[in-house]
Amino acid sequence: MNPIIDHISLCIERGKVDIRSPYPPDLKGQPGADEWARDALEQGLSPESILSACNTGMERVGAKFGRNEVFVPELLMAAKAMNAVMAHLKPHFQAGTVKEKGTFVLGTVAGDLHDIGKNLVSMVVAGNGWKVVDLGVDVKPSKFIDAIRQHPGCIVGLSALLTTTMANMAKTVQEIKGQLPEVKVLVGGAPLNQKHADDMGADGYAPDPQGAVAFLNKAA
Ligand code: B12
């Protein structure tokens, strides 16, 4: 495996954003996620392999968090490092946009502040020819409904990363379906599976951005 991939995973896991970042102290003065991502692309590594390296880093820091070995500040630094990589990847995922196929209204549900996965879905879906209306994080059902009314014919995507906010996701699906039954709703996020989606009354579940694109292209 290319050593740059390991560097990227490590920078995400340790929250090393760029060479100027003094955090973490033992990596001070060394290149960070920003520089390694740029080098990786210059060396011809694929955006997908770089993204996969980021996910490895995120999984590792998430597992450490689960074992109480690191805390929220470390997760925030990991997120910041991942955002530095995503800034390099964005043009690659958005390349090749042709005529818009439709509108995808996307957001992280109420109570949930995780947006890295949602942002990836947004980038890849936009890169596949869809207009994305990103409502951000902590989005209440009423805000989704307002956006749907502003974009007739849209398809909706909901993201949740916490088992606790899955209940808010279910409520959001129910409120959308109650008021606008014709609107198709796709759900995703690490704690979810197809059964959760079915139980919530969603039209689809996808584990990743590629699955979201497949759902949208089929639903369009
Ligand atoms: C970074 C992070 C944070 C950052 C988020 C920063 C940000 N801007 O997003 C911060 C520090 C804010 C944070 C806070 C918290 N976090 Co946190 N966090 C993480 C961490 C480490 C990584 C998440 C991530 O970005 N993964 C990488 C992305 C690319 O993956 P993803 O989000 O799963 O998205 C992919 C798929 O799920 C899918 N997808 C996502 N959304 C959608 C939507 C659609 C429509 C589709 C189709 C697909 C899809 O596609 C994406 C790309 O493949 C995870 C651990 C982990 N390994 O996941 C914990 C984790 C999610 N957090 C956790 C917890 C507990 C918290 C806190 C409660 C901690 C606390 N005590 O305060 C708070 C909650 C804050 C809140 N109200 O939301 C737990 C959740 C446990 C649970 N199951 O409920 C985890 C699992 C850590 C753990 N091991 O315990 N966190």
Image (spheres, grey):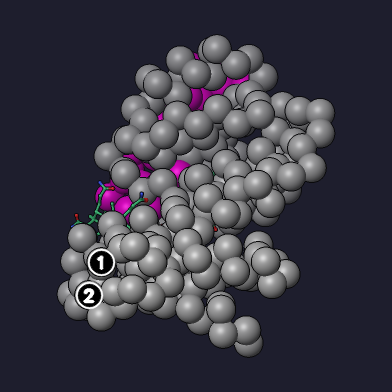
Asked if one can make out residue 66 in the rendered structure from this viewpoint, the answer is no
What residue is shown at x 50% (from left), y 65% (from top)?
35
What residue is shown at x 49% (from left), y 73% (from top)?
8
What residue is shown at x 50% (from left), y 59% (from top)?
85
Q: Nearer the viewer, residue 44 or 29?
A: 29
Element type at mark 1 = loop
Q: Quadrant of residue 89?
A: bottom right
Q: Which mark is residue 22?
A: 1
Q: Which residues are magenta?
A: 159-182
Q: Residues within 10 Å of mark 2 (few under 14, many from 20)?
A: few
- The amino acid on which the numbered mark 1 sits, given as a three-letter code, is Pro
| 2 sits left or right of 217 in the view | left
Return the residue at label 2: 25
Tag 1–tag 2 contact (CB < 8 Å): yes
Q: Residues within 10 Å of mark 1 (few under 14, many from 20)?
A: some
Q: Nearer the viewer, residue 182 or 72?
A: 72
Q: Nearer the viewer, residue 113 or 84?
A: 84
- Residue 167 image point, x, y percent: 33, 43
- The amino acid on which the numbered mark 2 sits, given as a three-letter code, is Pro
- Residue 69 image point, x, y percent: 20, 78
Q: Nearer the viewer, residue 31 or 171?
A: 31
Residue 193 drawn in magenta: no
